[in-house]
Amino acid sequence: MAKAQNREWVSLQCPDCGNRNYRKPRRTRGEYKLNISKYCPACRTHKVHKEKKK
Ligand SMILES: [Zn+2]
C-alpha cells in the first residue's frame, strides 16, 4: 500500500483573478502537470491554473 501520509496538497490558482479554486494532491514521483486548464467561477471561463503551495 502506498503511504498517504506524505501527500502534499497544492492549490490551483487562477492567474487572472488570483482565486485558488481547486486543490489536489501533489505527486512526489513521476510527471505531473504544472499548468492545468480549469474552470474559474470568478472569471466564468476556463483558465490555465498554476499550482501553488499553500
Ligand atoms: Zn479567475
Image (spheres, rainbow, N blue to C red):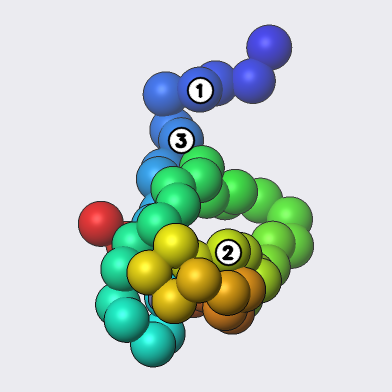
Circle 3: element type? loop
Instruction: Give the spatial CA distance, label 3 vs label 2.
Output: 24 Å
In the image, residue 6 lies at what x, y percent?
43, 33
Q: Is residue 40 visible?
A: yes
* Residue 9 drawn at (x, y percent): 40, 45
Quarter of image, ligand 1:
bottom left
Query: For the residues marked 1 and 2, what is the alpha-carbon distance in whole angstroms?
Result: 27 Å
The residue type indicated by label 1 comes to: Ala
Element marked by disc 2: strand
Residue 4 bears which disc, if any?
1
Amino acid at the residue labelled 2:
Tyr
Label 1, secondary structure: give it.
loop
Relative image position of residue 1 (x, y in whole percent): 68, 12
The answer to whether residue 34 is visible is: no
User: Do the numbered discs 1 and 3 sit on residues whose CB atoms are within 8 Å?
Assistant: yes
Q: Quadrant of the C terminus?
A: bottom left
Position above or below: 35 against 3: below
Amino acid bearing label 3: Arg
Q: Residue at x 32, y 81 (%)?
A: 17
Residue toward you, 12 or 28: 12
Return the residue nearer the eye: 21 or 32.
Answer: 21
Within 10 Å of disc 1 (Cα), the crowding (few <14, some 14-19, many 20+) is few
Return the residue at label 3: 7
Task: State how far apart marks 1 and 3 are (Cα).
Answer: 5 Å
Nearest to viewer (mark 3 / mark 2): 2
Residue at 44 percent across and 76 percent down: it is 43
Q: Which residue is mark 2?
A: 39
Image quarter for residue 34? bottom right
Taking the image as shown, residue 31 lies to the left or right of residue 54, namely: right
